[in-house]
Amino acid sequence: MSAHTAACQKKSYLVAGDLVLLGKTQGDFTCVDYQSLLATKQVWTIGWLPSAALTPVAPMLAPKTSDWVGTWYHPGGSIEIKSGKRDILDVEGGMTVPTANDFHNGGFKAQVTPKNDTVAFADDGTNYGEGCRVRLQRTGPWLLAVDNSGCGGAGVTFTGSIAARSRRA
């Protein structure tokens, strides 16, 4: 069956300007992960898109401190970045994931100095011990987050794109 047929198409769709995370490429198609920036829960859609329909987004090579500052929202939580002394950033994240009968939560805190378009750190140990590791990258208008799933209870992750930024802190 060809990927161009209706049988291989999903009911969900993307529109121009949506951010997708890229995976492997096979033939004329690339595997992508997508999460709506308007989602209230972490729900990822995974599928194949024509590679020709994708346009890379360039990272910010040298974001200023002010490019990081603000509250960045992610389904279930947020990451707040404040300007500290000298070019140090105060970074704090919080997440709540509902379960059938309860919820799982997580978080992190750190003081970091950006290196080019990225900050990487281990939590300061006050939240969930010393197992939480996070990497944040500025790409276009987005903040991309990746963690090692050690920042909270089961199912808690900050991994994904965080696009909505509110007030400057």
Image (spheres, rainbow, N blue to C red):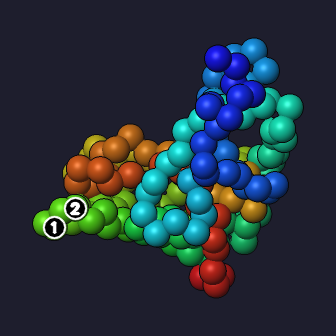
Q: Residue at x 64, y 17 (%)?
A: 1
State which quarter of the image contains the C terminus: bottom right
Q: Report which residue position mark 1 lands on.
A: 102
Q: Secondary structure at mark 1?
A: loop
> Percent position (x, y) of residue 108?
37, 60
Taking the image as shown, residue 141 lies to the left or right of residue 73, namely right
Farthest-out residue, front: 6
Which of the 4 image quarters holds residue 20?
A: top right
Q: Callout 2 environment at 10 Å: few (<14), some (14 to 19), or many (20+)? A: few
> Percent position (x, y) of residue 53?
84, 38
Q: Report which residue position mark 2 lands on.
A: 99
Q: Is residue 78 above or below residue 56?
A: below
What is the three-letter code of the residue carrying label 2? Thr
What is the three-letter code of the residue carrying label 1? Asp
Taking the image as shown, residue 156 lies to the left or right of residue 140, namely left
Q: Residue at x 32, y 67 (%)?
A: 96
Q: Residue at x 64, y 37 (%)?
A: 9
Q: Is residue 28 above or below residue 127?
A: above
Q: Are marks 2 and 1 in contact (CB under 8 Å)?
A: yes
Q: Is residue 156 above or below residue 10?
A: below
Q: Secondary structure at mark 2?
A: loop
Taking the image as shown, residue 154 lies to the left or right of residue 143, namely left
- Structural distance between the alpha carbons of marks 2 and 1: 5 Å
Which of the 4 image quarters holds residue 85?
A: bottom right
